[in-house]
Image (cartoon, rainbow, N blue to C red):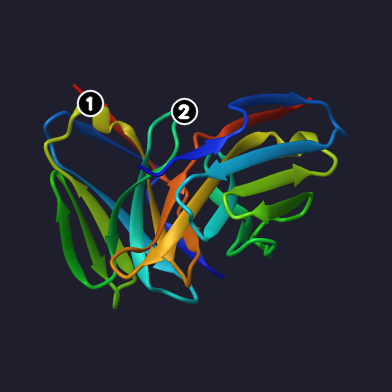
Amino acid sequence: GQSLEQPSEVTAVEGAIVQINCTYQTSGFYGLSWYQQHDGGAPTFLSYNGLDGLEETGRFSSFLSRSDSYGYLLLQELQMKDSASYFCAVDSNYQLIWGAGTKLIIKP
Amino acid sequence: DVKVTQSSRYLVKRTGEKVFLECVQDMDHENMFWYRQDPGLGLRLIYFSYDVKMKEKGDIPEGYSVSREKKERFSLILESASTNQTSMYLCASSFYNSGTRETQYFGPGTRLLVL
């Protein structure tokens, strides 16, 4: 079967750093994507890792280790507006296979 | 900016009714997708389409059908709505690029309640 595992909920303090992990087991793998979804909103694309290593986009970074079937999303200098659900998704030959999402709760 | 629109934000239907959910994208994307999203389950793929008049089953196609008569429009049909189809329905479109491959752009979603 195909599966992605990520924590259901993570809590952090405003201004801090938080890491959301994702492990995957899929029949095909071309890359790992991250999406953000605010309550009542649509998922929006954050980042993509096709190769091992770290990709940085402003306060957000994403990491991939293909040998470990593992990736993470790192959010720095957390702001209240970062409160949302974050989904990892495996690019498996023109389809995305989605994790169940991690709800990020940020406390002031 | 890519724009994906869905015909309704909220919809209430009765059990047994035929329900049509419409999705339109304005970026000439080849690929279009229908998902349903339920708490704790993430996004589950119902159907997708890579071209006009083409459709492929996703993970949970039972009770649904789709239509893609024009490139920009992808419709989801619930042949006979049931209460277990109460959910948030998300449409997405995508194109392939060598940098980020499969980046999907989502519509705002339709929250469907079947009574």
Q: Quadrant of residue A104?
A: top left
Q: Is residue B115 above or below residue A5?
A: above
As helix, strand or loop, the secondary structure at mark 2 comes to loop
Residue B106: image x %, image y %? 47, 44
Chain under numbered label 1? A
Q: Is residue B12 above or below residue A17?
A: above
Chain under numbered label 2? A
As helix, strand or loop, the secondary structure at mark 1 comes to helix
Q: Earlier in the sequence, mark 1 or mark 2?
A: 2
Residue of label 1: A80
| Amino acid at circle 1 | Met
Q: Quadrant of residue B20?
A: top right
Q: Is residue A108 above or below residue A70?
A: above
Crowd class of label 2 (few under 14; some 14 to 19; many from 20; radius 10 Å): few
| Amino acid at circle 2 | Gly
Residue B94 vs residue B27, the one in the foreground:
B27
Residue of label 2: A40
